[in-house]
Image (spheres, rainbow, N blue to C red):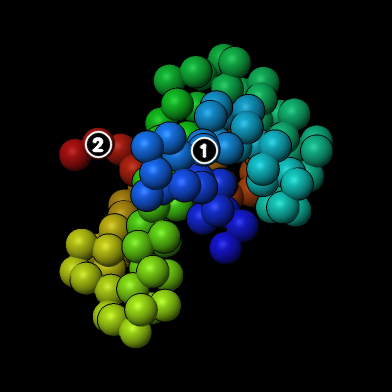
Amino acid sequence: MGFVNTLTGRDTASPAEKLSSYDALLEWARGAGVITAPIAGELRKAAEAHPGEAGRVLSGARALRETLHHLFSAVHQGKPPNGPVLADLAPRPGWFSRTAGCNGRRALSPASPT
């Protein structure tokens, strides 16, 4: 839920976005224990070398967050999640890839546009 709550006030005129940058995403992941500080540092360096990829990862993370929000909201309301939400959660070719700076670990990377 912490990840979903990185955007608050969705139903207001001015929602508060905590993932305002790739660096903010790394800080959230580090604080949540998803990655270590050294991995965050390596990913920052990779993002500096590949800013477009970092932007795609940030966009993908936000999209996943919103999909999870819709899923959790449906479950909370006692409704089944709709088809598009489930389709968004389906595995996609290329979603997991080796990312520079991850010491050979698997890291989330957005699927290539089709």
Left or right of 48, for residue 41 = right
Q: Which residue is mark 2?
A: 113
Q: Does residue 110 lie above or below 50 as drawn?
A: below
Regarding mark 2 in the picture, which secondary structure is present there?
A: loop
Q: Is residue 54 visible?
A: yes
Between the residue at mark 2 and the residue at mark 1, the CA separation in whole angstroms equals 28 Å
Q: Looking at this view, name the residue that lies furthest to the right.
A: 37
Q: Looking at this view, name the residue that lies furthest to the top.
A: 49
User: Who is closer to the viewer here, 8 or 31?
Assistant: 8
| Residue 77: quarter of image | bottom left
| Residue 21: quarter of image | top right
User: Which residue is drawn at the image coordinates 27% and 68% (left, top)?
Assistant: 86
Determine which of the numbered discs, if any, sits on residue 77 in the image.
Answer: none
User: Which residue is drawn at the image coordinates 45% and 52% (left, top)?
Assistant: 65
User: Which residue is drawn at the image coordinates 51% and 38% (left, top)?
Assistant: 16
Regarding mark 1 in the picture, which secondary structure is present there?
A: strand
Q: Which residue is mark 1?
A: 16
Q: Nearer the viewer, mark 2 or mark 1?
A: 1
Q: Is residue 61 visible?
A: no
User: Who is closer to the viewer here, 10 or 60?
Assistant: 10
Residue 95 in the image, given as x and y percentages of width and height: 39, 49
What type is the residue that disc 2 sits on?
Answer: Pro
Q: Does residue 56 lie above or below 62 as drawn?
A: above
**Which one is earlier in the sequence, the residue at label 2 or at label 1?**
1
What type is the residue that disc 1 sits on?
Answer: Ala
